[in-house]
Image (spheres, grey):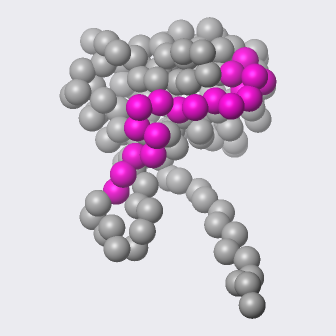
Amino acid sequence: MKDFNIITQLVDFNETEYPNSFLINAVETIGKDKLIILIRNLLFWQKIVFTSPTMAKRGKITNLQYYLLEDDLIISDYNKLFKACIELNDFFVLKQNKIVLNEDLSIKDIYKLRKIIDEGYELELKINIGKGLK
């Protein structure tokens, strides 16, 4: 049985508190600032996002099948995270330059994972519209 409390702890992790959970090893290994970024990106990958005002009740998950890592340094950081927090491997797996959901997760597990993230993780986005062309 998967411990979904791990996902709740990821959602609750923030800049102002020092973790008192399984994330302590990751803070010591990676550093808190990097860890915050890695966790935010991991949660955003599974967050339901409304990409248009016309999609009022129909959100979608971006990059549904995998989270692509394009930088060797970021791949290394996620590798360190998954080694420092082996509990995350029940949910996420690093395969070469992608993070995928653990194939042992059932459809119900995936739904529960996404529900915890969707209800608990507040997405912060900055959108720069800029000036229009004349």
Q: Residue at x 50, y 53 (%)?
A: 122
Q: Position of residue 62 (x, y in %)?
A: 45, 46
Q: Is residue 87 above or below residue 53?
A: above
**Above or below for 69 versus 86:** below
Between 22 and 107, which is closer to the camera in this rendering?
107
For the point 44% across and 62% down, which residue is it?
51
Q: Image point 36% across, 51% down: which residue?
A: 60
Q: Is residue 79 left or right of residue 57?
A: right
In the current view of this chain or complex, which residue is farthest to the left? 108
Of residues 79 and 65, the one drawn nearer to the viewer in this rendering = 65
Residue farthest to the front, as pictured: 134
Nearest to the observer: residue 32 or residue 69: 69
Kindly tell me whether residue 89 is visible in this rendering. yes
Residue 27 seen from this side:
no
User: In which quadrant is the N terminus drawn?
Assistant: top left
- Judge whether 132 appears above or below 49 on screen: below
The percent position of residue 35, horizontal first and vertical second, equals 69, 30
Q: To which quarter of the image does residue 105 belong?
A: top left
Number of callouts:
0
Q: Decide whether residue 63 is among the magenta residues.
A: yes
Task: Tell me where residue 18 appears, x and y as whole percent.
Answer: 68, 30
- The single residue placed furthest to the bottom in the displayed view is 134
Give left or right: position of 8 versus 109: right
Question: Which stretch is magenta?
Answer: 59-77
Quadrant containing the C terminus in the rendered view: bottom right
* Magenta highlight on residue 43: no
Q: Residue at x 53, y 9 (%)?
A: 86
